[in-house]
Amino acid sequence: MKIIIWTVVLLFSISMCFSQNYIYKGDDKFESTNTWEFEMKTRYWSGNPELTVGKKEDGSGYLLISIAVPFKSTYIGETLLVFLEDGTVIKCIDKGIRDHVDDQSMVIYNFTKDEINSLKLKKIAKIRFSILGGYQGKETFTADNKKPFFMSLNKEEKSFYETNTEIVELFKK
């Protein structure tokens, strides 16, 4: 019985090492970083936004942001700002590439090659985004690169996501 349990644990561990993350845009899939849940500065009814960076073949990329919303008519939209740790701001323009799946509003923003290079050098410190279509109209939120409810017994684990490290790894492939 112990052999079976250890075999299952080993196979699961191996599969996790080789698993791949993707962003889907229509029928196309793009390799991506892990998903990062940034902590909101204030409470939105559903929780925190999740971000993922995807890689396009030409060296540019995508930013996928999603958050649970109360109604299908409520969505993430307009300009999104990405603040890097050195104070640099990347302005992402809404191109209307959005979806609503499983009570989640999702939108994809584009990153240029130069913006990806900046993201490789400096970690994302925070983002500012807007939610539209709700009963209060447009609401703007800030979310920090801070793991929500972070608590670890491992002193080496960080309370933030090393976004730059993950982006460097993704774009090496």
Image (cartoon, grey):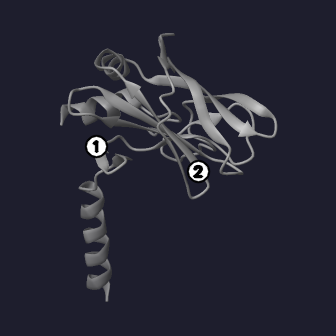
Tell me the mark number nearer the camera, choosing from 2 and 1: 2
The C terminus sits in image quarter: top left
- Most foreground residue, 36 or 55: 55
Q: Residues within 10 Å of mark 1 (few under 14, many from 20)?
A: some
Q: Position of residue 40 (x, y in %)?
A: 66, 34
- Most foreground residue, 93 or 20: 93
Q: Quadrant of residue 6?
A: bottom left
Left or right for 15, reference 142:
left
Q: Residue at x 28, y 19 (%)?
A: 113
Q: Quadrant of residue 143?
A: top right
The residue tagged with tag 1: helix, strand or loop?
strand
Q: Position of residue 91 (x, y in %)?
A: 49, 17
Q: Quadrant of residue 32?
A: top left
Q: Which residue is mark 2?
A: 104
Residue that lies at the very extreme toward the top in this rendered image? 87
The label on residue 31 is 1
Going from the N terminus, do you reach mark 2 or mark 1 first?
Answer: 1
* Amino acid at pointer 1: Glu
One can see residue 158 in this view: yes
Q: What is the spatial separation of the Cα atoms under label 2 and label 1, in whole angstroms?
A: 21 Å
Q: Position of residue 5 (x, y in %)?
A: 32, 80
Query: Mark 2 touching mark 1, by CB under 8 A?
Result: no
Q: Residue at x 21, y 33 (%)?
A: 57
The residue tagged with tag 2: helix, strand or loop?
strand
- Most foreground residue, 155 or 129: 129
